[in-house]
């Protein structure tokens, strides 16, 4: 005989607040952009080594090699330190990106100072820093970078020694300076295309995630309003339901009804449906947290599902039902009425679409509870599948339709799970619920069910 478990107060961990999630999205985008800057800095190191070697060995340009290599060593050391700091997922703010770009501008300015200042054709690579800052940084940071690069150029024009190159522009493409300009343009264009495209993809991803969070916040606000309305209605319905229960009990004992078996049967059916209404009202109040001590109870995953199926079949006009519980390792979990109501909603929708047959398949794969509810109805319309789980998206053609699946999707999302739907090849529809057991497990242990 199974021992009844005592109620407990454990509840599944709630989802993070939308504001915290939005901050995480911002930080994740900043981290990705910082990694892009580190990669770009390594390319700059390789480019500087190649340019210095080519200028000295091929074109025999006299450069202060020792000082330039010292600056290059500082740049390498800074990039190694940046990689060690940011290789893991850490929050990256606008200020940190701004400081990283300032270091890049400073190192590049030192190299230009040692190699001709504004007479060096690679001075136009300042534009790369400005454009990247315009894409990555806030407005004040970008304009600060613009002002600093302009000041650096002006300082180089005043203090840097000109590069010992013949400015023979009349030779056209044969001029060494013109060739340097062409190489500088090619580098600018290639790096901008590659990295600005990547950064733009990151920004688009961030914008899509923020839009999803805004939609989620609006849906959760909608749920809160619905919850307040449902809680108020549940309070109001309590008294008339209790009155009807008393009246039906009195009718059942009256001689006039005792002599009529058909009326007694109808009264019994009315009492069954009334009991179901009272159960729904109690579930609403439990979900609202008004009877906190009874809203969650220790159980096991198999026991919970088996009991849910028995209760559901006993309170609905179910004609054909297939239940396959393939969970081999029973796990102690804590469930509340919201989760039970979520599964009941999916089963109710399937029963309404297919009164003749409904199927429920349950299993656990890689720590995820997977439930599949199938029916033999007409299936989902393409427009319904495209907007599955959105409020007021329903094929029932009545006001308020679609709210059941809307609540199902949001309860599953709160638990860290997902809900998806599709049409079965043999006809009908299938709704799949996936929930992490870690979000609902009470303790990590197996239970031997005999």
Image (tube, rainbow, N blue to C red):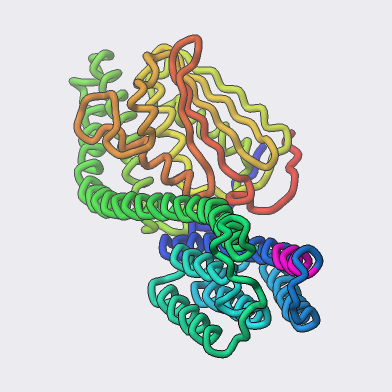
Residue at 55% x, 58% y: name it. 185
> Is the stretch drawn in magenta largely helix, strand or loop?
helix
Horizontally, is 383 left or right of 371 in the view?
Answer: left
Magenta stretch: residue 326 in it?
A: no
> For the image shown, how many numbered marks are present on the structure?
0
Residue at 74% x, 72% y: name it. 61
**Quarter of the image containing the C terminus?**
top right
Which of these two is toward me, 333 or 128?
Answer: 128
Relative vertical location of residue 407 with respect to residue 326 in this rendering, above or below:
below
Which of these two is toward me, 376 or 113?
Answer: 113
Residue at 45% x, 19% y: name it. 423
**Quarter of the image containing the N terminus?**
top right
Q: Magenta span covers which residues?
A: 47-56
Residue 139 appears in the figure: yes
Measured as percent of width and height from the top left, residue 294 is found at 47, 54
Residue 191 appears in the figure: no
């Amino acid at each position: 005989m199974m021992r009844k478990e005592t109620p407990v107060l454990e509840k599944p961990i709630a989802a993070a607040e939308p504001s915290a999630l939005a901050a995480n999205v911002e930080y994740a985008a900043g981290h990705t952009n910082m990694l892009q800057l580190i990669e770009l800095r390594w390319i700059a190191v390789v480019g500087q080594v190649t340019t210095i070697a080519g200028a000295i060995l091929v074109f025999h340009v006299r450069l202060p090699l020792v000082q330039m290599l010292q600056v290059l060593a500082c740049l390498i050391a800074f990039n190694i330190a940046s990689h060690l700091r940011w290789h893991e997922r850490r929050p990256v703010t606008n200020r940190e990106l701004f400081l990283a770009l300032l270091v890049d501008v400073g190192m590049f300015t030192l190299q230009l100072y040692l190699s001709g200042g504004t007479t060096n054709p690679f001075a136009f690579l300042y534009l790369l820093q400005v454009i990247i800052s315009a894409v990555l940084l806030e407005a004040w940071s970008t304009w600060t970078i613009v002002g600093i690069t302009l000041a650096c150029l002006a300082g180089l024009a005043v203090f840097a020694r000109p590069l010992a190159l013949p400015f023979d522009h009349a030779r056209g493409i044969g001029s060494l300076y013109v060739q340097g300009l062409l190489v500088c343009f090619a580098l600018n264009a290639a790096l901008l295309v590659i990295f600005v495209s990547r950064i733009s993809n990151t920004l688009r991803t961030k914008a899509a995630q923020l839009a999803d969070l805004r939609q989620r916040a609006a849906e959760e606000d909608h749920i809160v309003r619905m919850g307040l309305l449902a809680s108020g209605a549940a309070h109001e319905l309590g008294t008339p339901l209790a009155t009807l229960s008393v009246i039906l009990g009195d009718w059942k004992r009256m001689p006039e009804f005792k002599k009529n078996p058909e009326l007694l049967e109808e009264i019994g059916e009315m009492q069954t449906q009334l009991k179901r209404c009272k159960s729904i009202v109690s579930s609403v109040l439990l979900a609202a947290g008004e009877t906190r001590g009874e809203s969650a109870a220790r159980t096991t995953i198999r026991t919970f599902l088996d009991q849910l199926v028995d209760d559901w079949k006993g309170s609905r006009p179910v004609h054909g039902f297939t239940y396959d519980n393939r969970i081999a390792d029973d796990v102690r979990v804590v469930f509340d009425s919201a989760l039970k109501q979520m599964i009941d909603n999916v089963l109710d929708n399937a029963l309404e679409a297919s009164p003749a047959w409904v199927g429920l398949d349950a299993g656990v794969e890689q720590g995820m509870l997977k439930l599949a509810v199938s029916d033999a109805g007409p299936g989902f319309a393409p427009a319904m599948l495209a907007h599955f789980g959105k409020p007021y998206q329903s094929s029932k053609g009545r006001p308020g339709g679609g709210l059941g699946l809307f609540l199902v999707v949001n309860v599953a999302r709160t638990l860290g799970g997902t809900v998806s739907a599709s049409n079965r090849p043999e006809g009908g529809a299938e709704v799949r619920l996936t929930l992490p057991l870690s979000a609902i497990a009470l303790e990590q242990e197996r239970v031997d069910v005999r």
